[in-house]
Amino acid sequence: QEPRPRGRGGPNPVSDTTTPAAVTLPKDDGEARILDAIQQARQGERFANVSDADGRLLRQLTEAIGAQRVVELGTSTGESALWFSLALRKTGGVLHTFDIDPDRLAVARENFRRAGVEDLIVIHEGDAHVEAPKLDDQPIDLLFIDAEKQGYDAYLRELLPLVRPGGLILAHNMRRPAPNPAYLEAITSSPDLDTSFLLMDGAGMGMTLKKR
Ligand SMILES: C[S@@+](CC[C@H](N)C(=O)[O-])C[C@H]1O[C@@H](n2cnc3c(N)ncnc32)[C@H](O)[C@@H]1O
């Protein structure tokens, strides 16, 4: 390969290369057990679960904001919930996760047991449009929307009042499958919200701050 031209005006030797590989290394036995459970869950049937990069971001944001209450719409087999649990065992918080499919929830329950994180996660079975607004009024620090794509704007309307000022709304699949235009409009046209689109080389994640 030709050496890169250096100096003023030449291509930047860092930003021209591909993204460096990120990795999550276990800090303790509990973390190792959760990371093992994620790997094992990957061996089973998958349903558009989060990637490693998505999951790492969920954990990093949850831990960084010290989240006490995380709400997830769309548990599936529990992979994203396992990423959240890496953070929640450090913040002392709890995940409330919702899914309409009892078979997937049964697999998720087994994955949580294997990871040793049952105490950090409350599973709610049923239509999240109906069940999630029934949560008590403890504020939500982080809301993760990953259920049916056409419902994203309705979820935002239903749950934004419960998200604390300064809290985050994360939305999976902002690139693929094609996102719901009404959701995109809602998170990019309100002066009360501030949105970035992250990891758009994969499925894509919307990160929306509910401004103080
Ligand atoms: C893409 S999967 C979630 C993946 C999961 N967050 C992960 O990364 O491991 C979407 C899930 O949303 C659930 N779902 C679809 N419509 C729903 C609804 N109205 N209420 C609750 N869950 C719903 C489906 O059963 C499915 O398991």
Image (cartoon, rainbow, N blue to C red):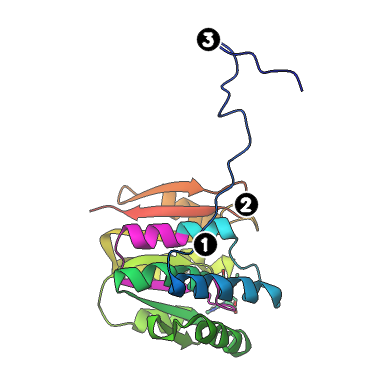
Estimate the x, y position of residue 167 in percent, counting from the top left.
Answer: 31, 60
**Above or below — where is 104 with respect to 6?**
below
Q: Residues within 10 Å of mark 2 (few under 14, many from 20)?
A: some
Q: Picture quarter containing residue 181?
A: bottom right
Closer to the eye: label 1 or 2: 1
Q: Amino acid at mark 2?
A: Gly
Q: Residues within 10 Å of mark 3 (few under 14, many from 20)?
A: few
Q: Is residue 49 left or right of residue 34?
A: right
Query: Mark 3 and mark 2: span between their CA atoms?
Result: 33 Å
Q: Picture quarter containing residue 94?
A: bottom left
Q: Amino acid at mark 3?
A: Arg
Closer to the eye: label 3 or 2: 3
Magenta stretch encompasses residue 64: yes
Estimate the x, y position of residue 36 in percent, counting from the top left.
Answer: 57, 73
Looking at the image, can residue 178 be seen?
yes
| Label of residue 202 in the image | 2
Magenta span of residues: 58-79
Give the total of numbered labels: 3
* Residue tagged 1: 55
Q: Amino acid at mark 1?
A: Gly
What residue is shown at x 45% (from left), y 73% (from top)? 29
What residue is shown at x 25% (from left), y 78% (from top)? 137
**Above or below — where is 78 with respect to 154?**
below
